[in-house]
Image: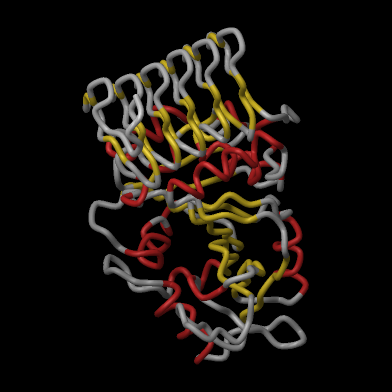
């Protein structure tokens, strides 16, 4: 793929994943033990693409501090910082000066996918397309932008979220552009590819095609999807070249301690230096580095931030606990509870049941 370069848009603030994204941008959150972006970059490299430009904004310096020049991943990474919010189209246009290839593959930095990227590129070239979009079939397309195509795969129109979608094909956040099209996006102003660029290309009669499949796909923007995506990576349901086949019910990293009788299931991840006490039950839990979960506690489908403490016999279900938070013994946090970093909840301080 010598004449193909990748652009990854990682400038979002990740507000739906707060409080975790107060301290780290969403693509850098640990997912199956690695920054989420590592999984996407490894898929890009597996497709034979070597040069990747990261369009950054929020906490931009964190990406370069971690990935450097990309050589550890056998990639050449370049960073472009967006000082003012420019939207998806403006963000793509903002990196144009760093692009030299004739074919540019663009990714949203918060999508976990399993599609073979070379197949999308093959279709793009086979159809002599100006733009090729990755489309994925979902059971309920109402929450997404729908993209109907004709029998040849040519895109007919772009429909924003609608209650009565005519197709189950949605925009999967991956596009292949001819470089000249990016140059036509207005420079330095906010532009939405979904609402402005793509409809304009259709109105101009450009060759816009859809690559449709039903491979693994998940937008990692909410705590629920983040937990599910991490679990699916651990269990091998979502593929990632970065994990090299380490699949099972749990992934426990070096330096973590797991006490006697603890049960780790559902694609649980235990971070480096974390301590899991005796008799703890972790089901679909994402435990960041250095967290401590004390004896008899239960954590289900929840994220426990770095250095947080969960007291003995506490119950965390469908929650997000921020970095360094301290949840006291016998607390119950259920159904979407979020605890901000450093907050201390005393023993028994929050309960949903009366028994202690």
Vertical position of residue 283 compared to residue 114: above or below? above
At which x and y percent is residue 232?
Answer: 64, 42
* Quarter of the image where one finds residue 32: top right
Q: Residue at 37% across / 21% down in the picture? A: 310
Residue closest to the far front: 355
In this orientation, which residue lies closer to the viewer: 321 or 172? 321
Colour theme: secondary structure
At which x and y percent is residue 242?
Answer: 65, 33
In this image, 291 relative to 43: left or right?
A: left
All told, the count of numbered labels is: 0
Visible residue check, residue 324? no
Vertical position of residue 206 compared to residue 181: above or below? below
Q: Residue at 72% across / 63% down in the picture? A: 214
In this image, 327 relative to 117: left or right?
A: left
In this orientation, which residue lies closer to the viewer: 74 or 335? 335
Visible residue check, residue 153? yes
At which x and y percent is residue 247?
Answer: 73, 30
Vertical position of residue 273 compared to residue 91: above or below? above
In this orientation, which residue lies closer to the viewer: 281 or 180? 281
Q: Quadrant of the C terminus?
A: top left
Q: Residue at 48% across / 48% down in the picture? A: 224
In this orientation, which residue lies closer to the viewer: 117 or 206? 117
* Quarter of the image where one finds residue 344: top left
At which x and y percent is residue 85?
Answer: 27, 59
Q: Residue at 43% across / 51% down in the picture? A: 222
């Amino acid at each position: 793929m010598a004449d193909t370069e990748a652009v990854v848009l990682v400038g979002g603030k990740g507000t739906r994943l707060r409080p975790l994204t107060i301290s780290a941008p969403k693509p850098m959150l640990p997912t199956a033990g690695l920054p989420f972006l590592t999984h996407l970059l490894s898929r890009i490299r597996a497709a034979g693409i070597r040069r990747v430009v990261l369009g950054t904004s929020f906490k931009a310096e964190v990406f370069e501090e971690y990935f450097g020049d990309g050589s550890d991943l056998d990639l050449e990474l370049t960073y472009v910082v967006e000082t003012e919010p420019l939207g998806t189209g403006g963000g793509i246009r903002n990196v144009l000066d760093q692009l030299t290839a004739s074919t540019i593959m663009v990714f949203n930095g918060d999508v976990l996918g399993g599609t073979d990227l070379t197949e999308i590129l093959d279709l793009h070239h086979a159809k002599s397309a100006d733009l090729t979009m990755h489309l994925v079939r979902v059971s309920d397309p109402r929450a997404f932008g729908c993209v109907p195509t004709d029998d040849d795969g040519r895109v007919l129109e772009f429909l924003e979220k609608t209650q009565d979608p005519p197709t189950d094909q949605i925009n999967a956040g991956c596009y292949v552009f001819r470089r000249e099209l990016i140059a036509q996006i207005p420079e330095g102003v906010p532009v939405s590819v979904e609402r402005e660029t793509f409809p304009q290309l259709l109105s101009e009669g450009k060759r816009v095609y859809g690559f449709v499949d039903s491979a693994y796909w998940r937008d990692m923007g909410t705590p629920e999807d983040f937990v599910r995506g991490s679990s699916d990576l651990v269990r091998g349901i979502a593929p990632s070249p970065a994990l090299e086949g380490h699949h099972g019910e749990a992934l426990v990293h070096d330096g973590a301690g797991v006490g006697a009788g603890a049960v780790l299931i559902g694609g649980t991840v235990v971070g480096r230096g974390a301590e899991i006490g005796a008799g703890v039950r972790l089901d679909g839990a994402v435990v960041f580095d250095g967290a401590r979960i004390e004896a008899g506690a239960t954590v289900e489908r929840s994220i426990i931030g770095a250095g947080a403490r969960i007291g003995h016999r506490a119950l965390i279900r469908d929650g997000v606990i921020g970095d360094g938070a301290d949840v006291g013994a016998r607390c119950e946090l259920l159904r979407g509870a979020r605890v901000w970093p450093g907050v201390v909840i005393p023993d028994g301080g929050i309960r949903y049941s009366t028994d202690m």
